[in-house]
Image: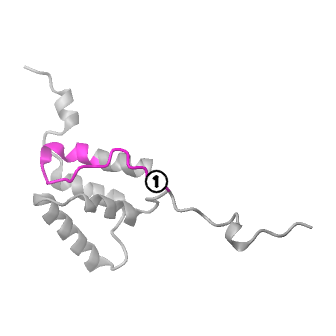
């Protein structure tokens, strides 16, 4: 007779997602000229690791964790404090974080505008 699988061999247990350390973002310091490339590197990392970062709080916390220097650190601290005033359990939606980030750090002459401008 065959034995039933032991509880440790259950097929229903879920393994922790493996986080791929591909293209980890650099620490952001608030420099407007690198704002969009930094944001895109964060979004690419989150996309590659979508199983590990499967909700907005994890995504926002991940992005904030790379805002460790200069103006970016002050902004991240302020953002975190504002979230705590609104809710002790949420960092808001990642889309809201992205909009706030772009409002504060996106250069006035964005990359799209720079590409559209003729040289000379």
Residue 47 belongs to magenta span: no
- Residue at image coords 43%, 59%: 53
Observer-nearest of 3 and 37: 3
Observer-nearest of 108 and 12: 12
Tell me: 50 left or right of 106.
right
- Residue closest to the far right: 1
- Residue at image coords 21%, 53%: 27
Q: Give the x, y percent position of residue 61.
A: 32, 64
- Residue at image coords 82%, 70%: 4
The dominant secondary structure in magenta is: loop
The part of the chain drawn in magenta is: 18-39
Q: Give the x, y percent position of residue 69.
A: 14, 59
- Residue closest to the far left: 120
- Residue closest to the far top: 120
Tell me: 116 left or right of 88.
left
Q: How is the image coloured?
A: one colour
Q: Give the x, y percent position of residue 114.
A: 17, 32
| SS assignment at label 1 | loop
- Label 1: how many Cα within 10 Å (few below 14, some 14–19, many 20+): some
Observer-nearest of 1 and 57: 1
Q: Quadrant of the C terminus?
A: top left
Q: Give the x, y percent position of residue 81.
A: 22, 74
Tell me: 103 left or right of 24.
left
- Residue at image coords 39%, 52%: 46
Residue beneath label 1, please?
50
Asked if 22 appears above or below 85 in the picture, the reply is above
Q: Quadrant of the N terminus?
A: bottom right
| The image quarter in which residue 23 lies | top left
* Total marks in image: 1
């Amino acid at each position: 007779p065959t034995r039933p699988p032991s509880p440790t061999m259950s097929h229903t247990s879920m393994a922790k997602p493996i986080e791929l350390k591909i293209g980890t973002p650099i620490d952001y310091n608030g420099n407007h000229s690198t704002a969009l490339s930094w944001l895109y590197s964060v979004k690419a990392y989150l996309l590659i690791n979508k199983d590990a970062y499967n909700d907005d709080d994890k995504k926002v916390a991940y992005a904030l964790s790379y805002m460790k220097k200069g103006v970016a650190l002050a902004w991240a601290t302020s953002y975190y404090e504002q979230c705590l005033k609104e809710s002790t359990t949420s960092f808001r939606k990642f889309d809201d974080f992205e909009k706030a980030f772009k409002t504060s750090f996106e250069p006035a002459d964005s990359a799209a505008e720079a590409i559209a401008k003729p040289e000379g």
